[in-house]
Image: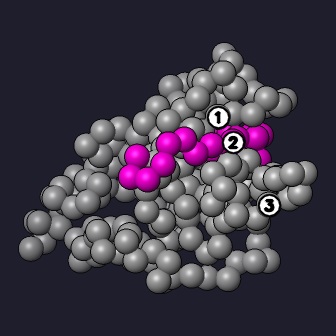
Amino acid sequence: MPADRYQEKRDFRRTPEPRGKGKRDRSDKQPVFVIQQHDASTMHFDFRLEVDGVLRSWAVPKGPSTDPAEKRLAIPTEDHPLEYADFEGVIPAGEYGAGPVLIWDRGSYRNLSEKDGERRSMADALHDGHAVVELHGEKLQGGYALQRIGGGEETRWLLVKTDDEHSDARRNPVSTQPESVASGRTLDEIDAAGKEGDEESKGNG
Ligand code: MN
């Protein structure tokens, strides 16, 4: 199972997150990316790229920047099932990652990774520790590089905007465009709706 660590960490009787049905062949489709803002024990943005039937994932504490001079720390996390790209809601208290999740941006992406002038598959590029993607999102467009730094248990990556016609040092979409691209809601609104849902289900026994 490609996402077994994901499943081990979660009790699907309790969390509304998708269970995930494992690997699916989407080779005829453009791969997707999603960035989910997640107010868990600490606020972060989960940056996920579809690679070979799963969502490869990094937690980015400050979120993505549109400024090529800003290097954003990206901590690798477990692969998530593709269905997770559609998840927005509240992970209940006591469950792994408890807190609201908002679909901050999403769309398709193109792999621009190269090595020695040759195109590199995403899986190989990530294995090498350097990948470049072109995002076609609603908030984010253009090139982003993922660069691995350090190694072993302390492996960290940097997520950096590449210099292109979409780079902009003055834009700060993390603070100026906080709403969900899926529902238009803010994180507080998602959290409040999730808590109402909890109350209703308790009321119904
Ligand atoms: Mn998260």
Q: What residue range appears in magenta?
A: 134-154
The residue at the point 66 percent across, 16 percent down is 170
Q: Which mark is residue 120?
A: 3
Locate the C terminus and report the quarter of the image it occupies. bottom left
Foreground of the two, 23 or 138: 23
Establish if 44 lies above or below 30. Answer: above
Side of 96 where 17 appears, left or right: right
Q: CA distance from mark 3 to mark 1?
A: 19 Å
**Helix, strand or loop for disc 3:** loop
The residue at the point 40 percent across, 77 percent down is 4
Residue 78 image point, x, y percent: 43, 62
Establish if 45 lies above or below 28. Answer: above
Establish if 162 lies above or below 137. Answer: above
The residue at the point 43 percent across, 53 percent down is 152
Quadrant of residue 16 within the rendered picture:
bottom left
Residue placed under numbered mark 2 in the picture: 145
Number of residues whose C-alpha sits closer than 10 Å to that of mark 1, classed few (under 14), some (14–19) or many (20 or more): many
Q: Classify mark 2 as within 8 Å of ligand 1 or not, answering yes or no.
A: no
Amino acid of disc 3? Arg
Q: Which mark is residue 160?
A: 1
- Is the residue under label 2 in contact with that under label 1 (CB below 8 Å)? yes
Q: Tell which tag, 3 or 1, sits nearer the viewer.
A: 3
Side of 85 where 30 appears, left or right: right
The mark that comes first in sequence, 1 or 2, is 2
Amino acid of disc 1? Val
Q: Classify mark 3 as within 8 Å of ligand 1 or not, answering yes or no.
A: no
Establish if 164 lies above or below 132. Answer: above
Residue 200 image point, x, y percent: 18, 63
Q: Classify mark 1 as within 8 Å of ligand 1 or not, answering yes or no.
A: no
Tell me which secondary structure the magenta stretch mostly adopts: strand
